[in-house]
Amino acid sequence: MSDIALRMEHVYKKFRKGEVYNSLRDFLPALTGKMFRQQELSEKDKRDFWALQDISFEVKRGEALGIIGSNGAGKSTILKILSRIMKPTKGNMWVNGRLSALIDVSAGFHQDLTGRENIYLNGTILGMTKREIDPKLDQIIEFSGIEEFIDTPVKRYSSGMYARLGFAVAAHVDPDVLIVDEVLSVGDYVFQQKCLKRMNEVIREGATILFVSHNMKSVAEFCTRALLLEHGRLAKVGPTQEVISKYLNRSGVDQLVDHESKTVLISKVTIRNNQGDCLGFQSGELAWIDIEIIARKRSSKLSVSLYITDERYQSVFDTSTERLGHGNVTLEAGQVFSCTFEICLNFATGVYHPSVLVYRYDTQTEFDRWAPAGTISVSSDDGVGGIVSCFPRVVREEIRHASTRSENSSTDDLGSQLRCITN
Amino acid sequence: MQEELLELYKYRGLLFMITNRDIKIRYKQSIMGFMWAVLMPILIVMSGIVVRYVYALAVHEHLQTADIASVAVKSLPWAFLVSSIRFACLSLINNRELVTKIYFPKEIFPVAAVMTSLFDLMVASGALLVFLVVTQIGAGQYLLWVPVLLLIMVVLAAGVSMIVSAASLFFRDVKFIVEVFLTFGIFFTPVFYEVSMFGNKAKWLLLNPVSPILDGFSASIARHQSPNLPWLAYSAICAVVSLLVGYAFFKHLEPAFAESI
């Protein structure tokens, strides 16, 4: 019993779609309307939306569990229920020990207070006492790397500094259970590495971690077990690699059931490298994306579009069969069309989401879209950041004394060092 | 219930931290800064005295020092009540980020609003004390009633604060209704006038649970009398009921806060 850190038992969560009454003017007519028109109840039931259905799992003490799934699968809802911000509609959950959630690390900040005051404020909000914060104060300030601005009101901070201070506080809470939701995307490369290191420390200290991310590489790195969510249901729990491959190669079976009205459907999208493996790619490597579409009715002038978005879902690349000169696909009802895109992943380290779209290119009618259809995790060892890898190298390096213009003539006397790297 | 109170006790550090934050930010970025905490009550007391003086002129009444002191000692608790409720009403809405993203007992917000106002009242009481010494109003054994009166006032403020904060989270209309009550409440509460002016109709005025408390302040400090005990007991009961109802109401709605704010 005591080696279980947290448990969820048949948890359901229902949200109401549509309007929420925020003022009496809206609410009172709605209330009287409800009383007089009982038959509308069924319509109301239709508006209910199950964000989570029958979720049960256990996490052992000291274990790191990854939670993956596409947008809207219910990941954030699970975290909100675990951190007790929301109550489940049905079911139970149980947490053993202090739980700290890095859902939004700077939520507790107040604009008008200084960095130092906010460390105390946010630390207390995250469950520490003043006495616990005092000895860690210097450590927190150092971790954040903004010593010089620590007595400036945080409203003057840049968004990066803001997030760094937030993470610095949250990372020093010493929780029994730590929930991390995509916060690693804050800050620059150096700060991200610092965060990963700190998370490793927290795991070594014996804390239990729940890690939610779109970044399959970090999930694979951190977590021994993972949990896959699909449309609010638990699709798979098990060893990380197995769960990730299931996520990346998800079939279109549930999509077929979901959208009977569509005339053309995407039924399968797989991403692979030359070994047929799909977990990680090197920058500059080739990737093949296999796509299958099924026609329910005769359709012509079909085109399959592939576009790629980055971690923040900003489009970075798009193409289509039609634009590549393979247009005019005509399918009879029941026919399957499959094609494979070959792309060169000239990306920098990061996570990219390919999406697939089927449309009729002359009328621009969209039939089906998988967005995202999977995840491509790219790594490069050449120390680049950003989105595109320009395959850089340093071809010249020089150190010399700074000199004013009048002293320019005597640069040699200053003994400047010059080193050239030639290739 | 017991569990919830224990949890609130566990989070007492956070309550003080939020109160501390609210006190700090209240006077940040103003030139006078903390001086406002003293200046505001002086202005309130002064305006109260002016109103009382004009009233006395109108009815050809000779104004005693005790009458002026009475207005002064009643204005401050009234200002405390108004500021608690006004501040609490928006306390959850203004802390949306914390309500939706981090778990802790949310009654901390309305209670912190009351504590912040209580802090202001304490500062103002210092200024009032100077005033009372200057006017040589003197002290007596009835001053022992002051902490009791204050306690009833705080309990009442906390109860009402919890109700309005939770209600305004769901319906923004509440803040307008509350504002109307707070603005016009002063006409139905003996702040700038005395209960005794109403003779045998006074009981209608005392039905307002705030009236016996304010009258009690006036009696124990300015008039050196015992407060009207039966009516004060009525106020105390109202205050306790408001706290119990307010807490139950708040706790009942709390699970829906994050989704509805």
Image (spheres, coloured by chain):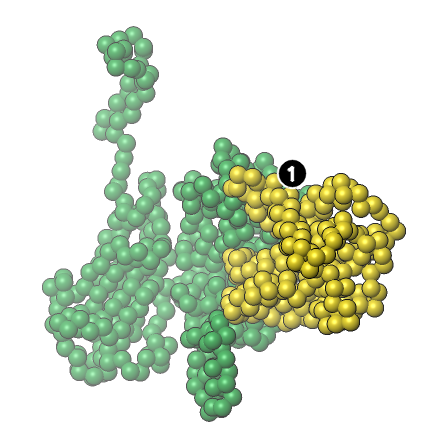
Quadrant hosting residue A118: top right
Q: Nearer the viewer, residue A323 or A405?
A: A405
> Horizontal and vertical percent for residue B144?
85, 53
Q: Which chain is yellow?
A: B
Report in which chain the residue with disc 1 lies. A
> Horizontal and vertical percent for residue B93?
53, 61
Residue at the spot 34% in from the left edge and 51% down from the top edge:
A378
At label 1, the amino acid type is: Pro
Q: Is residue B11 visible in this depiction of the protein?
A: no
- The residue under label 1 is A135
Q: Secondary structure at mark 1?
A: helix
Question: What is the quadrant of the N terminus of chain B in the image?
Answer: bottom right
Q: Is residue B171 visible in this depiction of the protein?
A: yes
Q: Nearer the viewer, residue B3 or B254?
A: B254
Residue at the spot 33% in from the left edge and 43% down from the top edge:
A385
User: Could you tell whether A360 is left or right of A256 in the image?
Assistant: left
Other-residue count near label 1 (Cα within 10 Å), few / some / many at <14 / 14–19 / ≥20: few
Residue ranking furthest to the right: B141
What colour do you see for chain A?
A: green
Residue at the spot 77% in from the left edge and 64% down from the top edge:
B196
Quadrant hosting residue A308: bottom left
Number of marks drawn: 1
Position of residue A25 relative to residue A77, above or below, is below
